[in-house]
Amino acid sequence: MAGNLEKFQSPGRGNGLRAIRSLCPGVTVFKAEPYVYTVCHGKQYRAACHHCLRRGTKLLRCSQCKFARYCDVRCQKAAWEGHKRECMCLKCVLPNVPTDSVRLVGRIIFKLLQSPDCDSEELYSLSDLQSHMKELSEEMKDGLGQLVTTLELYLKNQIQDSSQLPPGCGIIELFGKVTCNSFTISDGEMQDVAVGLYPSMSLLNHSCDPNCVIVFEGRCLLLRTVKEIPKGEELTISYIDVMMPTHQRQSQLQRQYCFTCDCHQCLSRDKAEDMLAGDEQSSNKMQSSLARIKDLQYQESEEKEVLGMCKALLNSSQLPDRNIHQLKVLDCAMDMCINLGLWEEALSFGLRTLQPYSLYYSNYHPVRVIQIMKVGKLQHYLGMFPEAMETLKQAFDIMKVTHGDDHSMMKDLRELLGDCGSSMNAT
């Protein structure tokens, strides 16, 4: 796959990747398995296989630590070599399970202890990754220091101190590298499942209007083109969700990645007025209410309360749906309705999100296509077959670029289109 791109010095950005031939939209430029990865802490830790990352309702628990979960014996055996050292650590620190970054750095250390020479990649390696320790704020450094203390507790039966690690692999430096270079691994519906380190893909620089996107098939990362890319042009992705006002994007990029974005979208403050459209006081009220909603929305027992909060906010709102705070409330209301089986209400909320999504996410964006597919599924379930067919065809045209013909999501979408066609012919 590296025949499509090469490492180079990007002016003002340090390392970067550029195309060594012209690329059209919808090309898989690179595939990568993670150097290390871990399932996200919280609800996902019990809902996804810790080896293949597939979701399941009847996952097997590790017989020793009672914490790691697997689809079946095959996944458990495949994961055991990497899990057995962590398994001992988990028994020592339960129920206070370390954070994602602690587990990720712990897995790097286990890997290095087992095989000090495993630090190699086709384009970039673990030792090449930048930690940006000098650029981090004192607050960030203090936070990393606390994580180091947590990790030492986590590893107390495996390693006495960092002198046992290969040269140049200080623990706090590893935390810096993970903070700046890890990728959130999402499932088919763009829900966070795991966190992984893909060293070669850390060469990709950021743009708020990128020419590539990253999607995942299980834990395998796929770098896909979404624009025409001439030979020699730099490949870019977005490090963050672009549905944020310019000042918030700039703040997050500076805090987490230690740089100020100077892409066209940031310099022109494109779409900034749309994102905060409507009365400022109402927008601020909607934003503050979102914090409470986010605290509750992943608790199954609170779904009805969350939906009630969303409805009350939307019924009293004078904001346009393109206001990003209102859009997020609409999104949450749709998800709560789906969880509660309120299909017609879910569809009414979902339809209101499609136009704003087309405004904030480029024509070929994985987040947008999943939203369109959700709406199409609801239309199909409610027997609105002509409308569902139109919506799902729109999703198909985008997904063949963002995901590609071989992705499992495309298989699901083709089946859904086939079912929709058969239902239309039967009526």
Image: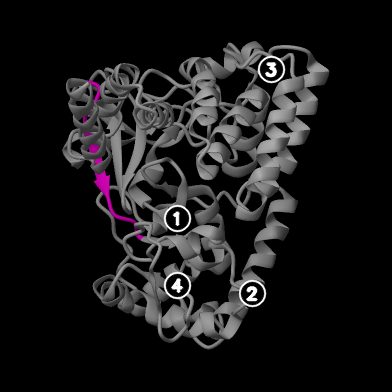
The vertical placement of 83 against 296, above or below, is below
Asked whether the residues under the numbered discs 1 and 4 touch, taking CB atoms below 8 Å apart as contact, a structural biologist would say no
Residue 96, numbered label: 2
Front residue of this view, candidates 425 and 37? 425
Residue depth check, mark 2 versus mark 4: number of the one nearer the observer: 2
Q: Is residue 136 visible?
A: no
Residue depth check, mark 1 versus mark 4: number of the one nearer the observer: 1
- Find the magenta span and give its range: 24-35
What residue is pinned by disc 3? 276
Label 1: how many residues lie within 10 Å, few (<14), some (14-19) or many (20+)? Answer: many
127 sits left or right of 138 in the view: left
What residue is pinned by disc 1? 194
The numbered mark, 4 or 3, whose residue comes first in the sequence reads: 4
Amino acid on which disc 3 is placed: Leu
What residue is pinned by disc 4? 109
Q: From mark 4 to mark 3, how far is it between C-alphas?
A: 44 Å
Name of the residue lying farthest toward the front: 427
The numbered mark, 3 or 1, whose residue comes first in the sequence reads: 1
Asked if residue 26 lies in the magenta stretch, the reply is yes
11 sits left or right of 383 in the view: right
Q: Which residue is drawn at the image coordinates 40% and 25% (left, top)?
A: 372
SS at circle 4:
helix
